[in-house]
Amino acid sequence: MKKGKSIGKKKNGFDLWAFILCLLIVFVAGFIGSLFTSNAVDSDWYKINRPSFTPPNYVFAPIWTILYILIAVSLYLLWTNSKNKKQKRNILIIFGINLVLNASWSILFFGLKMPALAFVDIILMLFTIVLMVYYSDKINKTASYLLLPYFFWVCFASVLNAGFIF
């Protein structure tokens, strides 16, 4: 192997290992959240309290799968297009906080049945998504655009969450 080449890096600059790592990072957060969600959506607590405009349960898994893929691609584009270690560190911090909040929401909402605390979590999550879009726009515009569906879905999820409180 030639000096300076990354493992998995092809001529076109695609780094397979970095992409796989980004997918793993994002999907681990999703998996942790799903541990608390899957059984809870069939519980009486959820069925009785959910707002009337809540989509059917089967809609959530495909939407979140698509969103997690978009988040991972965004993370990959930012990681591979960062100009220095400081940018990479900031990306990891912002995405890391967001993914912790993402997984925590499911724990708070479904696991602990604390929609008010989950609402605080989801508002913080929205704030981190705004930071992710803002920061990524400076590095790679495509990466920032890929985060917009995530932002809009979490806005909708915030309204659903509020429906459990008010």
Image (cartoon, grey):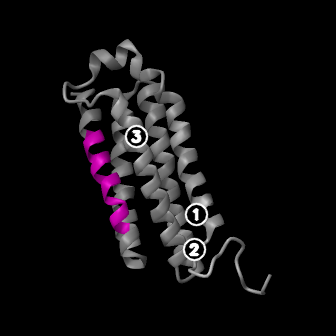
Q: Residues within 10 Å of mark 3 (few under 14, many from 20)?
A: few
Decide which of 86, 33 is in the foreground and name it: 33
Q: Residues within 10 Å of mark 2 (few under 14, many from 20)?
A: some
- Residue 62 badge: 3
Q: Is residue 88 above or below residue 52?
A: below
CB within 8 Å, label 2 to label 1: yes
Q: Residues within 10 Å of mark 1 (few under 14, many from 20)?
A: many
If you read the primary sequence from the N terminus, does the residue marked by circle 1 or circle 3 appear first? 1
Task: Inspect the image, locate mark 1, and give the three-letter code of the amino acid beneath it.
Answer: Phe
Q: Is residue 97 left or right of residue 113?
A: right
Task: Inspect the image, locate mark 3, and give the three-letter code of the amino acid beneath it.
Answer: Pro
If you read the primary sequence from the N terminus, does the residue marked by circle 2 or circle 3 appear first? 2
- Residue 85 badge: none
Residue corresponding to mark 1: 19
- From the top left corner, tell me how far across and down residue 143 is, in percent: 40, 68
Task: Inspect the image, locate mark 2, and give the three-letter code of the amino acid beneath it.
Answer: Phe
Residue at figure coordinates x 49%, y 50% from the top left: 99
Magenta stretch secondary structure, dominant: helix
Residue at figure coordinates x 31%, y 17% from the top left: 47
CB within 8 Å, label 1 to label 3: no
Residue corresponding to mark 2: 14
| Quarter-of-image position of residue 140 | bottom left
Instruction: Measure the alpha-carbon separation of dots 2 and 3.
Output: 26 Å
Q: Is residue 24 above or below residue 132?
A: above
Magenta stretch bounds: 144-158
Residue at the outermost bottom position: 3
Residue at figure coordinates x 78%, y 86% from the top left: 2
Residue at the outermost right position: 1
